[in-house]
Image: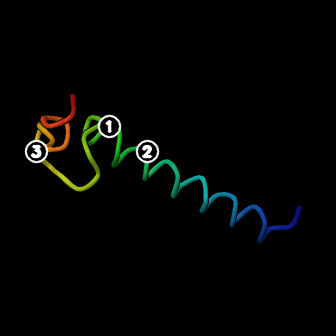
Amino acid sequence: MGFSDIVWMGLIIAGTLYLLYRSVWKKKGHCAGCDSQSCVLKKYKM
């Protein structure tokens, strides 16, 4: 495993952690497109 492989692996892991932070912890699991606490699609599903 060369140095460039380690750099690429670090970038991929950092990107994955950023996406998890943004979608799960920051928005607390809400839809990716909305910033509100209620999703319009969830209201109309039965």
11 and 31: which is toward the camera: 31
Query: Residue at position x 12%, y 37% from top?
Result: 37
User: Which is nearer the N-term, disc 2 or disc 3?
Assistant: 2
Q: Which residue is mark 2?
A: 20
Residue lying furthest top in this view? 46
33 and 10: which is toward the camera: 33
Q: From mark 1 to mark 3, how far is it between C-alphas?
A: 14 Å
Give yes or no for contact between labels 1 and 2 (Cβ–Cβ under 8 Å): yes
Residue type of the residue flagged with mark 2: Leu
Residue 38 in picture, x, y percent from top left: 11, 37
Residue 43 in picture, x, y percent from top left: 12, 35
Q: How many marks?
A: 3
Q: Is residue 24 above or below residue 32?
A: above
Asked which secondary structure carries label 2, the reply is: helix
Which quadrant of the structure image shows residue 4?
Answer: bottom right
User: Which is nearer the N-term, disc 1 or disc 2?
Assistant: 2
Query: Residue at position x 12%, y 44% from top?
Result: 40
Q: Is residue 11 above or below residue 27?
A: below
Query: Residue at position x 69%, y 65% from top?
Result: 7
Query: Residue at position x 26%, y 35% from top?
Result: 28
Numbered mark located on residue 13 in the image: none
Q: Which residue is mark 1?
A: 25
27 and 40: which is toward the camera: 40
Which quadrant of the structure image shows residue 24?
Answer: top left
Q: Which residue is mark 3?
A: 36
The N terminus appears in which quarter of the rendering? bottom right
